[in-house]
Structures are given as C-alpha cells and as structure tokens.
Image (cartoon, rainbow, N blue to C red):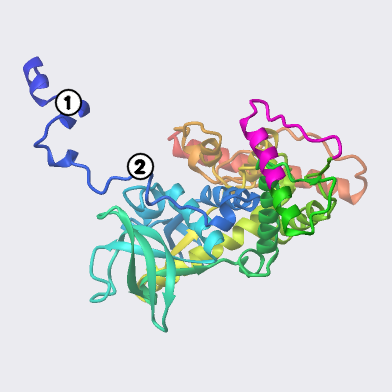
Amino acid sequence: MSLGDRFKRAWNAFSDNRSPTNPYMLMENVTSHRPDRMVYSRRNDRSIVGAVYNRIAIDASQIPIRHVRLDEEDRFIGDVDSYLNECLKYSPNIDQTGTAFMQDVVESLFDEGVIAIVPTETTKNPYLSASYDITSLRVGKVVEWSPKKVKINVYNEEKGEKQDIVMLKRHVAIIQNPFYSVMNEPNSTGQRLIRKLAILDAIDQQSGSGKLDMIIQLPYSVRGEKRQAQAKQRKKDIEEQLNESKYGIAYIDASEHVTQLNRPVDNNLLKQIEDLRTMLYSQLGITQEILNGTANEEEMNNYYQRTVGPVLKVIVEEMERKFLTKTAISQKQAIRYFRDPFELMTITKIAEASNSLSREGIVKPNEFRQKLGMKPDDSPQAEELINSNIKQPGQIQNAVPEGPPEGLSGQDLVDYYQQQLDELDESDRQLDELEKSLGR
C-alpha cells in the first residue's frame, strides 16, 4: 500500500468522535455505571457472605462449559460447531465474555435462589420453529410465575436498561440453587448469619456515630414541670457548649455528676456469628483455607466435588434440557463441563502422572505438552498412544538377556532359558522379514 493510500484509509478513534455526522458515535441512554452488571441485594452486599459467594462463582466460572458431541457410549469426541457453543466459549452477549457470563450466572443464583438464563437472540422464532440456534444469552431474575410462563427481569442491550418480559418456561433455562436450603431459605444458616451481621453493623455504626450517650445528674429533683423545664434548659446549655467549642469541651457545676453509657455491653453476638459462619462453611463444603488460598490438594478436590460440582451440574442439565431439541439429543449432542484434573497438581506430580499415563498408553505425549504450555512435537510418536509395557508390532527386543532372576532353580530355571530362546527365535524371524522387505 502506497503512502497516499495509507493516509486515505487511516482511521483514528479520537478524531472520528469529533465528527457530528457519525451515527456510531452518538450516545443514548447514558449512565455513569454499567447497567447490566450483577449487583448483590442489600442483605448480601455488605456481608462477608457476599465474599464467599464471589469466591465460589469465580472458581465455577473457570471450568469451561461446551456444546459437544458424544459417541455411542456417551463419551466426548469433539465440540459442536454452533452459535450456542460460541456463546458458552467466547461471547454470550455484547457485554460479557463466556467466563464473565458464568460468574454472573452463579453469583445471581446464590443471591436470588432461582434465576433464568434467557436466549435473547435466536436464528429463528422459537414460537414458530423448534430448530433454532441461540446467538445471545442473558441472566434474568424471575419476578412472576405461572403454570407455563414466567415473567423475567432481564437487561435489554438495545435500550440500555432492564425490563420485564414474559416467556414460556420451555424456552428459558430456569435454575434453582442446589444450596437453596442453606443460602436462601428465610431461616437458613446463610440468612441467619446475614441478619446477625446486620445487627453487628448497626451496633458498630451506632458506636461510631459521634453521640456521647451520657446522663447528667442534677443536684435537685426533676419531678415537677418547672424543674423538668429547668433540666431541659441545662441540657441545652451543655449541648451548645460542646457544639460551639473547637475541641468539644464543656463545663458543669461541682454538684453535677456525669454517667457515661456508651461502654460496650458484653453479649454473645460475636460468638454466635462465629458459630454460624463455621456452620455455613461446613454445609457448603468449604474451609477458611480455601478462601485464603492455603488449602492442600485434597481439600481443593473435595471442595470442587461437593461445592462447585453440584452448581455446575444443575446449570448444565437445565441448559441441555431447554436449549437442545430431542433431535439434537438423538444425534448425540450434549452440554458438558470439563474440569482440568492437573490444575491442582505440582510439577513433580504432573511429571510422575505424565510418565505413568504415557507408559500405559492412556494419553498422548503431545496432550501433556499442551498442559505444560509447550508446543506440540512434530514427531509421529508424539501423536500415538503406545503402551511401553507391551511389545509393539515390528519392535525387536534386546537380544542379550539380562540373566535369570534370583532364586530360580530346577524346572523354573529351565523354563526361563527356554523362554529366552523362543524370544531370540522370534527376533531372528523378524530380522528375516525385515531383510526381505528391504530386498536383500
């Protein structure tokens, strides 16, 4: 391209924004925050429970979910080239990646208890045809229920705001939290913990509000109306002294006494919160070590099986039930999630597993090289499943025996040498065939 063509075709984002005739640069429905972002409800927003939900959602979003094809034994053989798979893998909508979308799904599920995954765009009208592909997905909140329909509050990317829509249940994936009785029931462990934390926050806010919370004992009785008016005036005078003083200093009479009330009162609130937190962790299958990143491999595997696994399973099953037709299922299409079994292993254990699985012919060498972030090897052996413990066709064994094992005697020793002679004869036969094939 010549220098002149480069100047003619060049584009600059900042200079193009200055053009008043460019329709792509006109902003509509402007907000100062991202309107489609998932926001916790008030009961979870200011609670440590929200941090636990976020941790589980992040871990769940790191496990890929794919639209796949299975063989006759329901074993994975490859991905399906579909718009739905592109949504799950790359971009479910204009605002989110596949990972961000799954985190939104899990966090909304924990916060609401029941959510809907809404196919906002499809290749065909789902009310007129069952054979359609999904090109866009959004997470919605179910606000009303009926026998066959639901009203869902979901983000409309065309208008830039959330709105209520009515859809058939068979067209949307309605997912219920598998830990609903632990997190979302009114008297569940999670909700009780949230209420206790709200009480603790109220006490902390009250103690830091700047109030003095004190009682002034006057040197006279205040039972009569005249004395009560005199006491109120005395209180007002002290308040004015404190407000007008630069350092908050006031004076009282020598016969007046002050009693401070804002000392902490001993109660078992913190103990109850600690007990409820421990109970919630045990019911969800998590530990403090998982949250702070110091858990060992066994604890993490237990966490993925008991906590993350059930959440992903209900999501995958409902998406497969609603988003795949009977024809697609009969063609062995499915939706599956795949967790990397080597994610939590150290380099030493990965090397041991690589040696064992490659020797037994379970995985290919290039498959392990990919796990280590290395380029595939170009040699044909790197793409073959070879069991090194079994003699392969055309493989010539060592013609020099290493000697009989210790402890052999009598007939066992005779049988051992006879076996060695038979193997030598077989090697000779293979050499003869090789010479014939070379034309010698």
Name the kind of residue labelled 2 in the image. Answer: Ser
Q: How many C-alpha atoms fall within 10 Å of the one at disc 1: few (<14), some, or many (≥20)?
A: few
Provide the secondary structure element on which disc 2 rests. loop
Q: Residue at the location (48% across, 41% down)? A: 383
Q: CA distance from mark 1 to mark 2?
A: 23 Å
For marks 1 and 2, give the one nearer the viewer.
2
Magenta-highlighted residues: 233-255
Task: Choose top left, top right, bottom left or bottom right for residue 252.
Answer: top right
Decide which of 12, 226 is in the foreground and name it: 226
Q: Is residue 50 placed above or below 311 in the rendered structure?
A: above
- Is 144 part of what is drawn in magenta? no
On the image, the x and y values in percent for residue 78 come to: 42, 55
Which quadrant holds residue 235? top right
Residue 15 image position (x, y, % from top left): 17, 26
Residue 222 locus on image (x, y percent): 79, 54
Q: Secondary structure at mark 1?
A: helix
> Can residue 150 be seen in the rendering of this structure?
yes
181 w.r.t. 205: above or below: below
Which quarter of the image is occupied by the N terminus? top left
Q: Which residue is mark 1?
A: 15
Mark positioned earlier in the residue sequence (1 or 2): 1
**Foreground of the two, 171 or 201:** 201
Kindly give the residue lying farthest to the front in the view shown. 226
- Give the labeled residue for mark 2: 32
